[in-house]
Amino acid sequence: MKRTISAVTLLCAIAILPSAGFASTTVKVSLGDSGVVLDLSKNLGMAPGTKMDMAKAPMYIKIQPAMVPAGTVVFKVTNKSKDVIHEMLLAPIANANTALPYIDSENRADEEKTHDLGEVSELDPGKSGELTVDMKPGTYMIFCNVPGHLGAGMWTTIKVK
């Protein structure tokens, strides 16, 4: 009887505890802006697929690291802005110069056509959230799709090996 209880206990422990084979990678994501009041009703020319000096972008997404192994990736997202709501979406792309499908009249990416893998939706200033995704090798874009933010420079890419 003691053997049966031990075997059942062991099976329960295996079912509950994650194994080393299921380790995840964490990516820290910072969303932010320069604090300058901008007219975001038009594209500011910082969207993907355009030639621009990203150092002049009034908004940003910073990630660490920028390359991760395939598998489970946890995106820990923090809105560093003092007064602007931001969000984070993750979408597969062909390469780092890929322009996302865009809705000009709404000044944002067409989420139905980006085939995004998930998002951390509208974070108030100073708030945080998480997104966990099983990622395959390739290039992905991380972007904010609040109207005007993508065109103001709120995007970056991450490579999955």
Image: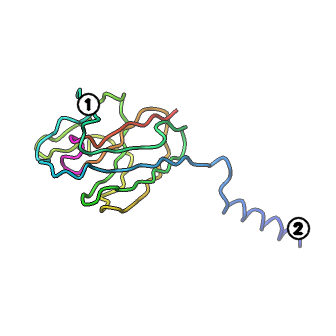
Instruction: Look at 34% across and 56% down and name the residue there.
Output: 79
For residue 81, side relative to residue 18 (left or right): left
Residue 155: image location, x then y, percent: 31, 41
Residue 24: image location, x then y, percent: 57, 48
For residue 96, side relative to residue 148 (left or right): right
Amino acid type, callout 1: Asp
Please tell me the numbered disc located at residue 41.
Answer: none
Q: Which residues are magenta?
A: 146-152
Magenta residue check for 34: no
Magenta residue check for 150: yes
Disc 2 crowd, CA 10 A, few/some/many (<14, 14-19, 20+): few
Residue 61: image location, x then y, percent: 34, 45
For residue 94, side relative to residue 146 (left or right): right
Nearer to me, 37 or 3: 37
**Image position of 81 with respect to 55: above or below:** below
Amino acid type, callout 2: Arg
Instruction: Look at 24% across and 57% down and name the residue there.
Output: 84
Nearer to me, 16 or 59: 59
Task: Name the residue tied to disc 1.
Answer: 53
Task: Name the residue tied to disc 2.
Answer: 3
**Image-quadrant location for residue 56:** top left
Q: Secondary structure at mark 2?
A: helix
The residue at the far right in this view is: 2
Instruction: Look at 42% across and 33% down and name the residue there.
Output: 139
Mark closest to the chain's N terminus, 1 or 2: 2
Q: Nearer the viewer, mark 1 or mark 2?
A: 1
Which quadrant: the N terminus? bottom right
